[in-house]
Image (cartoon, grey):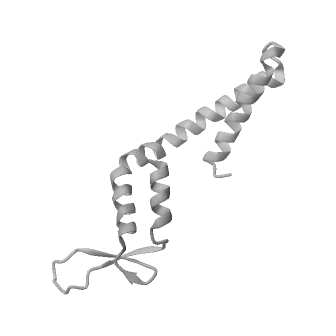
Amino acid sequence: MIEELKALAEKATPGPWHSTLCRCGHPKCRQQILSTQGTVGFDPEDAALIVALVNNLPAIISALEAVPVMKEALEQSEQGWENVVEMGLLPPDHWETANNLFHACSQALAALEGK
C-alpha cells in the first residue's frame, strides 16, 4: 500500500489543494470543487491518488493510531537494551546482538520522529 501511494503521489498534481463551493447557483447545492494551483478540477493521476487514499483510509488511520503505542514500546525496548549493554547483563558473546537491538530501536524511534 505504501509504495502504491508514493507512486501515485509522485504522479499527481502537487499541492496545495483547495476545496470551494460549487458555483452552479442552485440554492441547495452543497457540492465542492477541488482545485490545485489555481486550476479547477484534476487529471486522471489526481483522481487515482484520491481513490487510493479513500480506499486505504481505514488502514492509514489504524497505522497512525498504532504509532504512539509502537513509539512507547520502542522507547522501553531501547532503554532496556541500553541497560543490558551498559551493565553487561549478558554473556560477552551476546553483547553484539544486544547492541544491535539497541541501535535498531534507536533507528526506529528516529524514523517515527521524522529524524
| Image coords of residue 36 (percent x, y) | 42, 77
Q: How many marks?
A: 0
Residue 18 at x, y percent in the picture: 40, 75
Residue at horizontal 63 percent and vertical 49 percent from the top: 113
Q: Residue at x 45, y 55 (%)?
A: 5
Q: Position of residue 49 (x, y in %)?
A: 39, 61
- Position of 32 relative to 4 (above/below): below
Which is nearer the eye, 85 or 42? 42
Is 62 left, or right, of 91 in this rendering? Answer: left
Residue that lies at the very extreme toward the top in this rendered image:
91
Q: Splitting the image into 4 quarters, where does residue 81 fall?
A: top right
Q: Residue at x 73, y 34 (%)?
A: 103
Q: In terms of depth relative to the viewer, which is nearer, 71 or 12? A: 12
Relative to 10, 62 lies left or right: left
The quadrant where residue 44 appears: bottom left
Residue 17 image offset from top left, x and y in percent: 43, 73
Residue drawn at point x = 46 percent, y = 43 percent: 63
Identify whether 51 is placed above or below 56: below
